[in-house]
Image: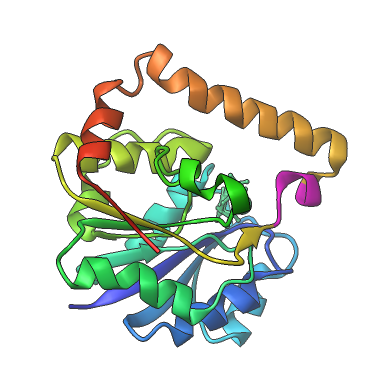
Amino acid sequence: MAIDVVIPARNEATTIAGVVAAARGCRFAREVIVADDGSTDGTGDVALAAGAKVVRRETACGSKAGAMDLGVAATDAEAILFCDADLVGLTATHLDDICRPYLEGRATMSVGWFDYGMLNPLVRRLPPTSGERVVPRWVWDSVHVRPSGYSIEIMINEVIAEGRLPTSVRIMAGVTHRTKRHKLGRRKGYRETWRMFWHLIGLPTRGVVRWRTQWFYLRGLTVEG
Ligand SMILES: Nc1nc2c(ncn2[C@@H]2O[C@H](COP(=O)(O)OP(=O)(O)O)[C@@H](O)[C@H]2O)c(=O)[nH]1
Ligand SMILES: [Mg+2]
């Protein structure tokens, strides 16, 4: 079973090389594809030098979801391991651990969560918003809502939950990411973080996501590690 890694990346030159190295070291990954649109900091060149296949679009795809689409279009793999480009502390072992429940048939979607320390027991049962996850290709193709920005993960969760399919989650010990504060500065970073938070809270209240999604999701959930 071929798994290719798709890494959406815009202006992530600081961290992309480390993420590509971890992905290339993943024993189950065949090819590592970085989808770069509109970066102005040389992200694509750094990724190429680190050994990734880079797919570029000069004009912006407009969203992370658009970049994910661009990356998936460049592979014929039966399964995709998505991974964000701004991770700090990621190793090949973290990605191996994410792939295993999928390959062993225990999960249709296997997700890695950031390490939130004491909050981990709570975090592991929330709807996963992290970008590190393996899904079969058909799941990605079934995500018909392609909203801009961060809610794409929620839309993937929806496909899994509505299909009553099993998910496995695990904490990626020691892994964090460069937050919006790092990328945008304190003031704009906090504003964007709040905006994201309210956007996520608003999804069920605005009817974009049904409440039952979380119920179905939890019924199919296995927490590992
Ligand atoms: N190519 C591309 N990547 C994007 C775009 N928007 C976000 N990303 C990438 O998607 C990943 C997650 O985005 P990020 O801004 O870190 O969201 P956060 O983790 O919710 O703060 C990162 O690797 C970004 O570089 C985009 O428009 N184009
Ligand atoms: Mg991030």
In this view, 102 is above or below 92:
above
Q: According to the image, what is the colour scheme of the structure?
A: rainbow
Left or right? Give the position of 182 relative to 155. Answer: right
Total numbered circles: 0
In this view, 51 is above or below 90:
below
Query: Residue visible at 13% across and 40% down?
Result: 163
Query: Residue visible at 55% across and 66% down?
Result: 173
Query: Residue visible at 37% across and 81% down?
Result: 31
Rendering coords of residue 34 (x, y %): 50, 69
The answer to whether residue 75 is seen in the rendering is no
- Looking at the image, which is closer to me, 149 or 196? 196
Q: Is residue 34 magenta?
A: no
In this view, 48 is above or below 225:
below
* Residue at the extreme right of the image, as rendered: 186
Left or right? Give the position of 166 relative to 177. Answer: left
Rendering coords of residue 139 (x, y %): 22, 50
Left or right? Give the position of 95 relative to 193. Answer: left
The answer to whether residue 118 is seen in the rendering is yes
Q: Where on the picture, by quarter, is residue 213?
A: top left
Question: Which residues are the magenta region?
Answer: 178-183
In this view, 132 is above or below 162:
below
Rendering coords of residue 51 (x, y %): 53, 86
Q: Where on the picture, by quarter, is residue 36?
A: bottom right
* Quarter that holds the C terminus: bottom left
* Quarter that holds the N terminus: bottom left
- Looking at the image, which is closer to me, 51 or 210? 210
Query: Residue visible at 50% across and 27% down?
Result: 200
Magenta stretch, main secondary structure, is helix
